[in-house]
Image (cartoon, helix red, strand yellow):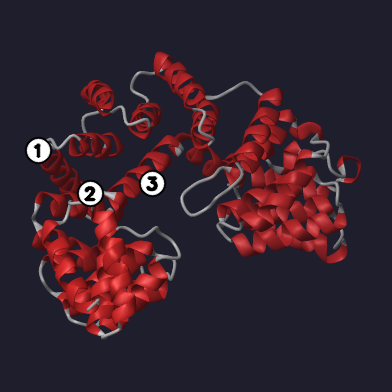
């Protein structure tokens, strides 16, 4: 269930942050950013009639006219920061991010204290996923006087920084920094539902579950149908392994949001953990509604494997691998199914590919050791066990594989040593293998 749990975590984190992410993504576009030419007081005393005319065209979304006027003005006044910002705004509004970034940078070069240029460039870079480049621009904006743009836009800079620093799947982030940045935003503007969700998510990621629960409850008190708040609350219960309580909570939540994918996935999780048969049809229904969702498909594949439909499970993994052939975790799950189907050579190949892609994948090394032993490749088994030992402790099963591999290679001293370790670790739990170990020790130690 490891990959299933990871998939649920991804889905829950995405859901819990959905409201804030939506606000953040909308804030980067100039049309709705509030960072517009008429909001700035940069060069207010020097604004030319030509630039004023261009800004009037911008107000009417007449981008071509605005661009023509600004280009004509800048031909003779290339260092006019306000005009350069305006051209960046126009390019941004027309979905020309590279041009926009270039003009914003030129505006900053002409006027390093241009709040709106730093903010707009930072938001644009954040939208493009260039977090390392966006961060210094946004940080600079928080230290500048926003002028007529107002404190609301400075708060947006703080919120954008919090979004950049927020830990998320594939990005470790800095929860403490994100929390502090959110607090700075709240000093300037009132708390929004998106702020509350972000604060809850940050508290959860810091292990402060009570604080996170309190935040989710505040939102639910105002809006019982809040999907991210319901999903976040359920996720907390799952993290705390309060599965029965989570099931009760989710049933109530799904009465209000019956087709919500995150809540359905969470319900499938708590049902599966409790070995309830409802989990499989629930995920099958969810997958039918979202056949192209890789996370849901992966979750269904794992549940099918647990339910014993190995062929059905593997068909889904093959489908996922067609789109992501170098996903080490998918390869491991596929290989584990191949082992269950008795296709050991194919399993060895899949495990080998997974460990080449991700040498730290301990499940891949464990699977490779076992599958290689089934097709009598002791050298491969020993190599895989050696790599596995860098990441996981030994157990009775691995001791037995060490022993039998050395035995096959006629390395008697090592084989006997590991047979003894196996017997000590097994302690009567593996009677057939323990009988075999004792028989081999009688021969090896003659």
In the depicted structure, whether residue 248 falls above or below residue 160: above
Contact between labelled residues 2 and 1, with CB atoms less than 8 Å apart: no
Between disc 3 and disc 1, whose residue precedes?
A: 3
The residue shown at (15%, 50%) is 306
Q: Which residue is tagged 3?
A: 10
Quadrant for residue 278, please give it: top left
Q: Where is residue 108 in the image (x, y as percent from the top left)?
A: 81, 55
Q: Does residue 355 appear to the left or right of 430 in the view shown? A: right
Quadrant for residue 257, please give it: top left
Mark carried by residue 290: 2
Quadrant for residue 435, please give it: bottom left
Q: Does residue 295 appear to the left or right of 129 in the view shown? A: left
Question: Dot 2: what SS?
Answer: loop
In the depicted structure, whether residue 2 falls above or below residue 310: above
Q: Distance between the residues labelled 2 and 3?
A: 16 Å
Q: How crowded is mark 3: few (under 14 residues within 10 Å), some or many (20 or more)?
A: some
Judge by depth and name the residue closer to the eye, 419 or 390. Answer: 419
In the depicted structure, whether residue 290 falls above or below residue 359: above
Q: Which residue is tagged 1?
A: 277
Q: Does residue 351 appear to the left or right of 35 in the view shown? A: left
């Amino acid at each position: 269930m490891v990959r299933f749990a990871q998939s649920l975590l991804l889905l829950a984190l995405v859901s819990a942050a959905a409201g804030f992410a939506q606000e953040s993504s909308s804030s980067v576009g100039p049309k709705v950013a509030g960072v517009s030419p008429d909001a700035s007081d940069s060069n207010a005393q020097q604004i030319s009639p030509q630039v004023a005319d261009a800004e009037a065209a911008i107000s009417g979304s007449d981008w071509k006219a605005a661009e023509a006027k600004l280009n004509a003005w800048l031909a003779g006044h290339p260092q006019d920061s306000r005009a350069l910002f305006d051209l960046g705004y126009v390019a941004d509004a027309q979905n020309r991010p590279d041009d926009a970034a270039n003009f914003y940078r030129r505006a900053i070069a002409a006027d390093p204290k241009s709040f709106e240029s730093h903010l707009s460039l930072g938001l644009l870079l954040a939208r493009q996923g260039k977090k390392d480049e966006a961060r210094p621009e946004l940080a600079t904006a928080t230290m500048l006087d926003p002028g007529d743009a107002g404190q609301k836009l400075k708060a947006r800079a703080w919120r954008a920084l919090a979004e950049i620093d927020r830990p998320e799947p594939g990005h470790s982030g800095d929860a403490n920094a994100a929390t502090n940045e959110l607090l700075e935003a709240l000093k300037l503007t009132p708390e929004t539902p998106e702020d509350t969700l972000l604060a809850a998510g940050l508290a959860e990621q810091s292990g402060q579950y009570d604080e996170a629960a309190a935040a989710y409850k505040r939102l639910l008190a105002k809006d019982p149908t809040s999907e991210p708040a319901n999903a976040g609350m359920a996720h907390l219960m799952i993290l705390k392994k309060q599965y029965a309580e989570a099931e009760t909570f989710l049933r109530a939540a799904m009465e209000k949001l019956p087709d919500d994918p995150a809540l359905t996935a969470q319900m499938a999780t708590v049902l599966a953990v409790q070995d309830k048969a409802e989990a499989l049809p629930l995920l099958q229904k969810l997958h039918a509604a979202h056949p192209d969702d890789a996370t849901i498909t992966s979750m269904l594949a794992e549940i099918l494997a647990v339910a014993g439909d190995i062929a059905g499970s593997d068909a889904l993994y093959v489908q996922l691998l067609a789109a992501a052939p170098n996903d080490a975790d998918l390869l491991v799950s596929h290989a584990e199914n191949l082992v269950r189907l008795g296709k050991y050579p194919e399993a060895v190949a899949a495990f080998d590919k997974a460990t080449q892609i991700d040498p730290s994948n301990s499940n891949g090394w464990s699977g490779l050791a076992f599958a290689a032993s089934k097709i009598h490749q002791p050298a491969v088994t020993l190599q895989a066990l050696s790599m596995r030992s860098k990441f996981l402790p030994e157990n009775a099963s691995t001791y037995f594989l060490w022993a039998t591999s050395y035995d096959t290679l006629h390395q008697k001293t090592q084989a006997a040593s590991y047979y003894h370790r196996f017997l000590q670790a097994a302690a009567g739990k593996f009677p057939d293998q323990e009988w075999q170990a004792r028989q081999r020790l009688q021969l090896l130690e003659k």
